Image (cartoon, rainbow, N blue to C red):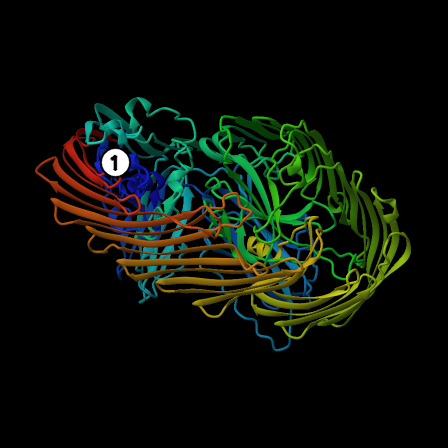
Amino acid sequence: MKNKLAAVLSNSFSYQRLIPSAKSSLLSVVSGLVFCSVAVVAQTTSGSNTISTADYTLTIITKDSSETNPNHFNEVSTTDFTKGQTKKAFNRSIALNDGGVVWVTQDPSKVTPKLNVTGASSVTVHEGAFVTPMSFTLSTNYAHYIDHWVLTVYNETDEDFTTPLAQFKGNELAIDQTVKWDGKTANREELQSGDRLVYVLRATGKDGHVDETNTRSIALKSYYKNQVDEPVVLSGSNALESNLRLQTIPVYGSSVRVSGRDIVEGNRITINGNPMTLSERKFVTETILPEGQYQFAVNITDNAQQQYTKNLDIKLDGQYLFMIGLADITAGEGSVGGNLETLSDGDEQLDGDIFVNGRLAFYLKGKVQGKYLLTAQMDTETAPIEDIFDDIHKKDPESIFRRLDPEQYYPVYGDDSTLVDDTDSQGKLYVRVDWDKSKALWGNFNTDFTGTELSSFNRSLYGAKLNHKSTQVTSRGDNRTDVSVFGSETQSAYRHNQFLGTGGSLYYLKDKDIVDGSEKIWIEVRENENSERAIESVVLVEGQDYQIDDYQGRIILNRPLLQVVKQANSSLIKDNALDGSQVFLMVDYEYVPSDFESDNVSYGARGKAWLTNNIAIGGTVIHESRDTDDYNHQGIDLTIQKAIGTYIKGEYAESESNQTLGSFLSSDGGLNFSPFSSNASEVGTDTQGAAYSIEARANLKDYSSKEGSIGAWYKHREAGFSSANTDTTIDTIDAGVSALVTLTESLKASLKATLLEVEATSKDTSISLQADYKVSEKVTVAAEVRQVTEKDLVNSDNDGEGTLAALKLGYGFSKDFNVYAIAQGTIAESGGYESNDLLTLGATSNLSKKVDLNAEVSSGDRGDSALIGARYKASNDYDLYTNYTMARDSGDNQERNIVTIGQRKSVSDQLKVYTEHQYTHEDAQAGLGNTFGLDYKLNNKLNTTFSYQQATLEQTSGGTVDRDALTVGLNYKQDHTEASARVEFRNDKGESEHTKQFVTTNKVNHRVSPSLRVQGKLNYSETKDQLDNDLDAMFAEAGVGFAYRPVNNDRHNILGRVTYQYDLSPVNQSDEVDEKSLIASLENSYQLNQRWEIGGKVAYKQGEVRSDRNTGEWSKNNATLASARARYHMTHNWDLMAQYHWLDSIESKDTQHGAMVSVDRQIGQNLKLGVGYNFTDFNDDLSDKIESAEGWFLNLVGKF
């Protein structure tokens, strides 16, 4: 683990600046007038940090627990800062008789509660019961704080969790605890094949707080004669995995890990009676414990079945302090011979006067009273001593330049370390205090004003933020009070992009050079009925779900985002032969426009308080100062909630001005954008408006024995009301009621009525009534009546009204073969309403336990469609399916063929949502298509991915676009090699456009030996306009790096890398400069003996840019750098150091080189004094003059 400050400081001393155009920067690099030293001196817990206190580099490496050298813990010394003395730590490792070692470590700084439950994803049922019992595996790492737990199973249709099918309870929760279920239900309800169950684990703390996991599902499968169930293989240990949805139990203290390695095959180990699962002869288990002294009994059963026990001991005092820092002062006198007019404003150090520069930097992480965790960092950077604290509270304008190089660090360091950034700040200062569930910070933050529809505000800013959550919770686990306040001197502007799924994984943002880490990306599901009500949304996580290049404005998803058309409702009546929905990729981010003024202030507050267990009130206030039109927003919300599915929610909000004038939609992955209509609002106009909404729902089970629910909503948004994610400048009303009631065991009835009114544009209403009746075990009947009214408020000639009715008859020839027929007719019609008669026939069949077939054909007034599909159960948790759909729209009489290849993989509910629900809705595009991809594990080493999409986009601007998208990928993992490769192809073809896109992403990581690691990547994309034969966009990223770090000789280290990047951005991105660069570097350090240490580095950078898009001459910016250094440790505390640097720029014909010598004296443990002299000369062919720069310096470094 490399701390961010340590990595930055180390990087700043490796002389990687290769910018020959900036003379002052070059002189500061090669002159050696300013340098720093860093050391670690404070760490009051004896963790697994290996510390190096070299003069010019600082590396903090914390290996994974399973890799830590346990011998480090036999005799560990720690510093007691309260007494200023060193004391002996506990013996925390034991050697096993047959070989191997087990040890214990603690981490007071990171306490992350984890709770998990897993089980088989499918179970076979016969005659209403399980054929064989199933098992659940329960795990947690904070059992000490849990009083009791309950595992509950529900039917998937019981969305509000009102009627448990089975419950299991316990007081203690062990690691990988097993619970068996034979399928018997609490109310003796028979389980039916084809149904799905869900289960959830709830844990209650000793003070009544409740934690809860996300639900997981179980599919009930049919039983076949002579069937042999496959064994269900679950992952070995879930103790380090978490599936928490709600976490309110107060957890404090330290994370304690017991690890083992090199365990002899066949040996069995238990820790305090809990069996450990070995993987590659290693294990690790984690628990959170409060302050105190603990003993872990390690019981070993060897291959001879002999048992013995050894104990591990650890003491937790809740105190923790880790600190590194430096105070550096450099004084000197520099002079330049020759042409003094060439000196720039930044060369004051060479004008012959005495200068004094300084720098203060520190990183601190400490825990007080076992509860308050403080994280802080400051780095003033090197500056004149009187200026180092200037603008300490502001965002550092140089921060953007320190991240321009995407490969600023080596791709691989060979030590399995991880760069940790827990001080996210674009300024010189970061401070954060965490306690309970609350935090206060100065640095980068997300406003996180979420949970409401009308007052949502989620920006990434720099400044101060306080979030306080009370430790008291309601009976459902909500914090009694939750208050957030923020203030920021706005350094950036807000932007919102929406992307229609293209069938690929590459998406270009509207802007390049966005603020690092400011993106928020999610997938949103919306109703496809001209409504903006979201059905579902899934937040994506960087690294896990996508990669982003902030500088180039480019997103690559880890899975292709495909269009999906799938109606999830039970309505019999269809508006068209093939109904469905689509998907958006939603992206919010911050960027800095060229004329942006950064001295405006933004502030806001959001609070919510539960007055009782059932009533909550909230409020939101937001203000953004701007040059012309300040944005103001105020909102209140009220919640009255009886249970999960019974509530009333109301909101009211007012806004003044537009939240953003920069929201855009793209249907082709960012090659072209359409602005939201709200973007057209003139800057400085006094736009204001209000919006309010009320939503109510009741689950009948909360009031009676009846099953069912009723709901209603009303939403009114005035034209002047502004919300970043909503494109509207028109007064809009969206209202409706719905009800679903189980009248008897055989009869269900539903009602739905909707109203959508857009001022001066349209007014549509719909009301429908449906009944479903189970006549017998084989026969089902359903009927629906719907009244539709469509009013065109612009042209009344288009007004229309229709009454429709539908009847469905289903018959099951057996439990494995069912057929159905649906007849839909237009009973009455008037005006411009188009007749909508439709006849549908369908069938489903279970050919075997693994194979299902389905077919459906529809024909009617508005078009025809036919669908045939199959599903194959590849394993217990993995289904593959394919569908072929033909559809003809009567409007244009054009036939469309849609191929669907898909998957349902029960890895987790989050992953299933991502891979099965990707939809969207937008007035500018109406899509027709059904697509998806599959992953299939060929063997234990190789995994393949495949997806194909064939669909049509209908554009309101006229015409259609036919889209084909194909993705093929491979993932390989064995022993010391991990590799992945993916290829995508997309073809969009319409009357006025024809675009082809090719994308490939590849990476490999190989451990040649324990001492040598190699890592490489290659990403390439080309998008071409086939009509004009022009490139719409292209980029290439390639890199390879290696690290040679001998395991048995840590005195020798070699790091190397080569990277290449080419970028041709889409025309619609804000910055259209073409760029390409090639960087190569090699760095070596070697400690010859106790006295001599040598090192060197060579680097080459070839950078080229051109201002004319895809044409014109490239402007080069090439440089070569070489450096060498040697250090000789003389007697006692004296060191002699010499450095030489050479820098050559081909284009500017500058060659600059310099030498520096110094003598350092260590004064005590925390102070070093150095004195030296610098020699520099260089050739400048433009002036044809020989110049020299030289000077003495005095350097004082305090280390703390």
- Horizontally, residue 613 falls left or right of residue 556, namely right
Q: Nearer the viewer, residue 548 or 904?
A: 548
Q: In the image, residue 751 lies at what x, y percent?
A: 81, 50
Outermost residue toward the bottom? 226
- Would residue 1122 be found to the left or right of residue 795 on screen? left
Residue 40 visible in this rendered orientation of the protein: no
Q: Which residue is mark 1?
A: 27
Please give left or right for residue 378 compared with residue 137 in the image.
left
Three-letter code, disc 1: Leu
Name the residue: 27% across, 59% down. Answer: 1010
Where is residue 356 shown, x and y percent of the image? 24, 24
58 left or right, relative to 658: left
Q: Nearer the viewer, residue 598 or 343?
A: 343
Residue 1138 in which image quadrant:
top left
Q: Secondary structure at mark 1?
A: helix
Q: In which quadrant of the rendered image does the C terminus lie? A: top left
Residue 624 seen: yes
Residue 1137 figure quarter: top left
- Nearest the viewer among 1122 and 1126 is 1122
Q: Is residue 859 shown above or below 756?
A: below
Image position, residue 577 (x, y; %): 77, 62
Residue shown at the point (46%, 34%) measured from the top left:
444
Residue sitting at x 29%, y 25%: 384
Residue in the foreground of this view, choosing between 195 and 976: 976
Residue 34 is situated, as x and y percent measured from the top left of the image, at 24, 33
